[in-house]
Amino acid sequence: MNKKTIILGSAHGKNVSGKMSPDGKFREYEFSRNVIKEIKPRLEQLGYEVVVDITDDVVPLPQSIELKKRVGIVNDICKKKGTTNCLYVSIHVNAAGIGTTWLNASGFSVFVSPNASKNSKKLAKIFTSNAIRENLCGNRSIPFERYWTANYYVLRNTYCPAVLTENMFQDNHKDVDFLMSEKGKEAIVDLHVNSINEYFKTL
């Protein structure tokens, strides 16, 4: 049996404006890369091959070039390994505003594209079910489908099943305090490792 390959997508780089808490103490690019550094070895211990699409703190600009680079990395791997043996999970932190004011929206959510495959939706539902069980969904109204849909480039154009996770809100003070704690970071790492592993066990 072919080894399953998981491509982890880092958040936009430190050279992309915004993407931080209103007080500037929390940076999405840094959090995403830090949790990926913990998710990767844990998945490898479970027998998966793990690739990170962009490890550098700085990403190519404009954003269209960045997104095409990420999709190119994923799809090149899919061509070599086969789409059924690959999975793409892009790891972000949400924002309700433009990053200048503390707001009230809180909690985890997961997105698929409008053209999402059955397996993309399956993975998204697993993420949401686990997030509900771990009390990570905050005050968001969870859709009946147990995932949100958005026309994100990296989800729409990758060959393999793909989801994008929004791990709480960087403009919610309570969420930021949680994410900056060891307990919070570990909860997000656990959510990703357990959900990805559970997904492959259902295939």
Image (cartoon, grey):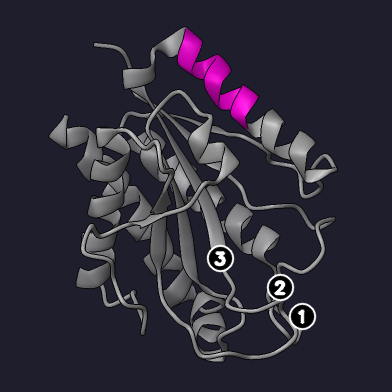
> Disc 2 marks which residue?
20
Whole-number angstrom distance, CA of label 2 to CA of label 1: 6 Å
Whole-number angstrom distance, CA of label 3 to CA of label 2: 9 Å
Residue located 32% across and 57% down the image = 147
Q: Quadrant of the N terminus?
A: top left
Q: Position of residue 165 (x, y in %)?
A: 45, 56
**SS label for mark 2:** loop
Q: Position of residue 163 (x, y in %)?
A: 42, 45
Amino acid bearing label 2:
Met
Whole-number angstrom distance, CA of label 1 to CA of label 3: 14 Å
Residue located 54% across and 20% down the image = 75
- Say which of 177 and 160 sits in front: 160
Tell me which secondary structure the magenta stretch mostly adopts.
helix
Q: Quadrant of the C terminus?
A: top left
> Disc 3 marks which residue?
93
- Say which of 49 and 15 sits in front: 15
> Disc 1 marks which residue?
24
Per the image, is 73 magenta? yes
